[in-house]
Amino acid sequence: MPNESGPNHSGTASSDHPYADRFPVNRRLPEQGRPRAEVLAELEQIATEEDRAWEGGKVSGTMYCGDHDHYAYLTEAFGRFAHVNALQRDICPSMTRFEGEIIAMTLDLMHGEAVTGTEPGGLVTTGGSGSILHAVLAYREQAYAAGNRSPNLVKPETAHVAFDKACHLLGVELRVVPVDPATTLVTAAAMADAIDEHTIALVGSAGNYPYGTIDPIASLGELALERGIGLHVDGCLGGFVLPFGEELGYDVPEFDFRVPGVTTISADTHKYGYALKGTSVLLFRDQALRAGQYFHQVSWSGGKYMSPSIEGSRSGGLLAATWASMVHLGRDGYRRYAADIFSTAEAMMKVVRAQEDLRIMGSPTFCFSFASDELDIYHVADHMRPKGWRFNGQQYPDAIHMAVTRPQTQPGVVEAFEADLVEAIAYARERSAAGVAAESGAIYGGVPGGLAGLTDDVTDFIEQIMDSMLDAQMSLPPQ
């Protein structure tokens, strides 16, 4: 539908607002509502166009399932409970069933049966950042109860920035430990050097987001037990695919509750659990740690209030859809999809290793990153972008990564990756030799001089640009 005239609907199309010249721009609440069929037709057109970006299997991560039939199934499950408030269990006891079983099934996946001496438990959160936030909150509250008012958390540099955000929000000091550049992994010895009497927990990843490699969880568990602190394993990315890789015979070290010292685990159902966006599971070796971050208010004029997490009202649809995904797929379904993902990742990494100008970072599994000592790797990303490839860019060192998901397992994707990559390397050699800067380097790349170049002035400048980008994402097109 073209734009309607008048101040409510004028707009100018741009990269931030590509629909401004095609559909109404609502600058205020419309006086008269639009027919449902018209609204739904507009949504269908937008959704269909945007789905084309990932359906061909050229987008790293993002769309982990990519199966429209499965999405339709989840949408139906969600729709039956979308209007339900999961906070009010007296009128929707189904939420207790769904949430309890989601937690139980995830505990089963993470070998909750290996826990002895305590009763394990969990929370369903709104995503990986939510699970990490609640883990840090639980450790902080435990520290406060013990009289530690200056808690700190120790993580490898590769651990997700959600830990940085959680510590920032919760007033916990974050101590970041460098990783071995050859392996991309942290060592227990390096982590030990950062621990003091105020340390509340360590962090290890299975696997980490930048490189897909798995930290030495067993040695970190020994260190945590030795120092009497917690160990959080961030399995947000790998939690619902690595266990099945292990069952299939791939080299996946133990990272779950079989490892003594692991006290919490996060695993995202909205990634390789193939549920809808907005769900993750946080597991606790001991329910007492979980209970320590519950919120209660018994003196409010509105009545006694309690919630197990920061969120209050939640749509019951997400719990229903997550439960529906897990019980529909079962271990057999997850295992079959994992087999396709691991074999596809192996094939794509074989393609990368065959290129003399490229190198794989560390020893990854289903998610891998590649860099180059010979050319500007961002030229590779630039050349492949018009062909539909969307990689995730990294810095320090410059690299790009591919988190293999089900869309990549489609026939012909690996072959297209190889053909396009070979062309991209030739392009990158030519552009690098000419000293031409890569376009995507401005987005992905680090500053000259590496981390030492991140002075306060440079950081402030970059953050101003990022603020502008965030502002634009919540703006209207100019009139």
Image (tube, rainbow, N blue to C red):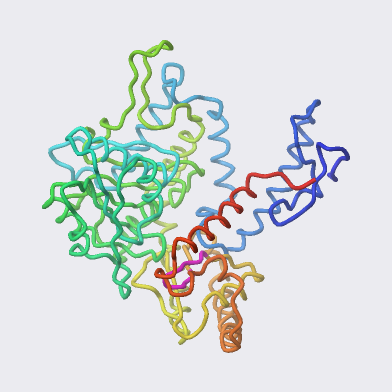
Residue sticking out furthest to the front: 457
Residue 77: give x, y in percent of width and height: 53, 35
Residue 436: give x, y in percent of width and height: 61, 82
Inspect the magenta stretch and tell me whether residue 396 lies in it. yes
Q: Look at the image and tell me in which quarter the N terminus lies.
A: top right
Residue sticking out furthest to the right: 5
Query: Magenta residues, as a range?
Result: 392-400
The one nearer the camera, 240 or 24, is 24
> Could you tell whether 440 is left or right of 458 in the image?
right
Vertical placement of residue 323 versus 436, above or below: above
Residue 208: give x, y in percent of width and height: 36, 60
> Could you tell whether 272 is left or right of 12 in the image?
left
The one nearer the camera, 73 or 240, is 240
Inspect the magenta stretch and tell me whether residue 342 lies in it. no
Q: Look at the image and tell me in which quarter the C terminus lies.
A: top right
Vertical placement of residue 371 versus 115, above or below: below
> Could you tell whether 193 is left or right of 345 in the image?
left
Residue 93: give x, y in percent of width and height: 41, 21
Report which quarter residue 430 is drawn in. bottom right
Q: Residue at x 59, y 78 (%)?
A: 437
Q: Residue at x 27, y 34 (%)?
A: 290
> Could you tell whether 84 is left or right of 206 in the image?
right
Q: Residue at x 21, y 46 (%)?
A: 230
